[in-house]
């Protein structure tokens, strides 16, 4: 009796198996050539018109110029692009997408900033109209100075202009 360990290191014995997938691909490729053909206009003696790839006997055959095969374009087909050209186009599309995203982010940031300015201007105008005491820092001394009653109408007009400018 033969020791099974002796045969363990050897690959399994090939059985007479034929790989069918490549053969099916070849057969399909050969058969698909028959799908391409000319479409003809067939007219019989009675004047009946029929369209077919092969006209029956006793009919007059006229070429229609219509082909069964789909064509990529009516003109000359463009040569396939090289890897470098496809890569350059891909990189160009990536850059365009990044630029579009940057523009969109910038626009949304500007909108958010405009909304914050609008909210601040509205709240300041509301504070002025309610008659609340408004204090500012004096630029020379740094002390707190309150807005006087005579300055309120001018300050309200300035705040209204700020609301009109920021809240569109």
Image (tube, helix red, strand yellow):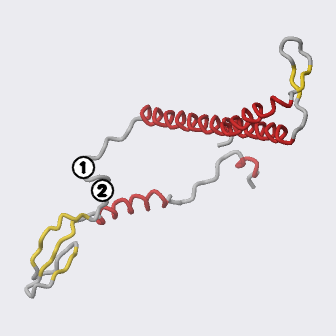
| Residue 111 picture location, percent across and down | 67, 39
- The residue under the point 73% across, 39% down is 118
> Most extreme residue toward the bottom, as rendered?
46
- The quadrant where residue 41 appears: bottom left
Q: What x and y, as percent, mark residue 133?
A: 90, 33
Q: What crowding class fits label 2: few (fewer than 14 Cα within 10 Å), some (14-19), or many (20 or more)?
A: few
Eyeballing the image, is 143 above or below 46? above
Q: Look at the numbered disc 2 and give the secondary structure of its residue.
A: loop
119 and 87: which is toward the camera: 119
Which residue is labeled 1 in the image?
75
Asked if the residue under mark 2 is in contact with the one under mark 1, i.e. CB atoms within 8 Å, the reply is: no
The quarter of the image holding the N terminus is: bottom right
Residue toward you, 154 or 5: 154
Number of numbered tags placed on the structure image: 2
> Nearer the observer, disc 1 or disc 2?
1
- Above-or-below relation of 68 to 72: below
- The percent position of residue 30, horizontal first and vertical second, equals 33, 60
Please state if 102 lies on the left or on the right of 92 as rendered. right
Q: Residue at x 91, y 21 (%)?
A: 144
Depth order, front residue of 70/167: 167
Vertically, is 32 above or below 106? below
Determine which residue is flagged by label 2.
Answer: 71
On screen, residue 55 above or below 10: below
């Amino acid at each position: 009796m033969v020791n099974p360990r002796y045969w363990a290191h050897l690959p399994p014995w090939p059985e007479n198996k034929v790989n069918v997938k490549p053969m099916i691909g070849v057969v399909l490729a050969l058969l698909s050539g028959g799908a391409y053909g000319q479409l003809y206009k067939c007219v019989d003696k009675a004047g009946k018109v029929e369209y077919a790839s092969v006209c029956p006997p006793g009919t007059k055959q006229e070429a229609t110029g219509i082909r069964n095969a789909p064509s990529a374009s009516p003109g000359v087909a463009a040569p396939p692009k090289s890897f470098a050209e496809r890569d350059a186009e891909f990189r160009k599309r990536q850059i365009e997408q990044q630029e579009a995203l940057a523009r969109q982010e910038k626009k949304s940031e500007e909108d958010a900033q405009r909304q914050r300015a609008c909210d601040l201007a509205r709240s300041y105008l509301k504070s002025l109209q309610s008659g609340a005491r408004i204090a500012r820092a004096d630029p020379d001394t740094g002390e707190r100075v309150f807005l006087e009653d005579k300055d309120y109408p001018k300050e309200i007009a300035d705040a209204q202009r700020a609301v009109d400018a920021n809240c569109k």
